[in-house]
């Protein structure tokens, strides 16, 4: 009885630890906000003050272009994954 | 003179026969009692031997029964999550990541509208930066800050043109 009980308790302990960690991770991810009082707002405002409007707008434009490329690549990966999961769609949707 | 034959009394014969039967019955009863006691001791010994031999198996079956019926002393903390809940938590993590990405995109959209802020800088630093921004170079009538800004934008434009030409082979 003792060894089976030990296995059960070990598995249950691992499951409880993993569940607790994952639940905390969800809470931490949801707690990340970008309001005007966050430090990153102050940092970007300071950067704008230092480099001026022209360079700041140029930097932000570069950031937008980079985000656009990342989103494009992400959509490409998602669609490729979905089409690889469905055999009927394989080869019919292509990203060039 | 012939010897006179004497027959025993019939009552003596009956008594002897009764005693004989009683003794025989007593012997049979004693024998049955002995057999019964032997059987009892045999079954007790067999039961003890079997219980000793199958004690681990009985304990295992009891453990399985306890596990299935959930009679273990588990606290509420120890039964907070189970394996199907972990899959729901994975889905929650994916949804939390998607929510975080949406918040990042909203923040990126607001980047262009963030006002200039000198709150994090020292007052002396702010004074120096204002001096560089507002002081014009003689004869050129342009501030050093404007010149640096223009050079950076020019270099950025050249770099962008190079990247576009390399990417599209124009």
Image (tube, rainbow, N blue to C red):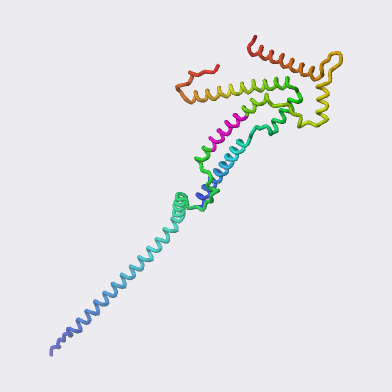
Measured as percent of width and height from the top left, residue A62 is found at: 67, 20
Question: Which residue is located at x 51 percent, y 40 percent?
Answer: B85
- Numbered-mark total: 0
Q: Main secondary structure of the magenta part?
A: helix
Question: Which residue is located at x 53 percent, y 35 percent?
Answer: B91
What are the residue bounds of the magenta stretch? B89-103
Asked if the stretch drawn in magenta spans residue B90, the answer is yes
Measured as percent of width and height from the top left, residue B111 is found at: 67, 26
Up/down of A64 relative to B88, above or below: above
**Residue B24 placement: quadrant:** bottom left
**Residue B36 placement: quadrant:** bottom left
* Screen quadrant of the N terminus of chain B: bottom left
Left or right of B126? Residue B104 is: left
Asked whether B92 or B62 is in front, the reply is: B92
Asked if the stretch drawn in magenta spans residue A57, the answer is no
Question: Which residue is located at x 54 percent, y 18 percent?
Answer: A95
Asked whether A25 or A47 is in front, the reply is: A47
Up/down of A26 relative to B150, above or below: below
* Screen quadrant of the C terminus of chain B: top right
């Amino acid at each position: 009885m003792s060894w089976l009980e030990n296995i059960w308790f070990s598995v249950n302990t691992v499951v409880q630890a993993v569940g607790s960690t994952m639940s905390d991770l969800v809470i931490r991810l949801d707690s990340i906000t970008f309001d005007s009082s966050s430090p990153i707002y102050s940092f970007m405002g300071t950067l704008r003050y230092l480099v001026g409007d022209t360079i700041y707008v140029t930097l932000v434009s570069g950031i937008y272009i980079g985000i656009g490329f990342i989103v494009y690549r992400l959509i490409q990966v998602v669609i490729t994954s979905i089409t690889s999961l469905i055999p009927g769609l394989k080869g019919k949707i292509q990203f060039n | 003179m012939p010897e006179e034959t004497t027959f025993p009394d019939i009552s003596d014969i009956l008594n002897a026969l009764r005693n004989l039967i009683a003794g025989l019955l007593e012997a049979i009863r004693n024998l049955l009692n002995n057999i019964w006691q032997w059987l009892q001791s045999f079954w007790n010994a067999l039961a003890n031997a079997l219980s000793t031999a199958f004690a681990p198996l009985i304990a295992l079956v009891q453990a399985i029964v306890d596990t299935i019926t959930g009679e273990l002393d588990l606290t509420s903390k120890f039964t907070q999550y189970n394996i199907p809940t972990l899959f729901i938590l994975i889905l929650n993590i994916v949804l939390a990541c998607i929510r975080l990405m949406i918040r990042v995109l909203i923040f990126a959209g607001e980047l262009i509208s963030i006002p200039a802020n000198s709150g994090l800088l020292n007052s002396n630093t702010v004074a120096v930066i204002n001096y560089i921004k507002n002081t014009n170079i003689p004869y050129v009538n342009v501030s050093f800050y404007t010149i640096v800004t223009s050079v950076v934008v020019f270099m950025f434009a050249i770099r962008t043109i190079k990247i576009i030409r390399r990417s599209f082979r124009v």
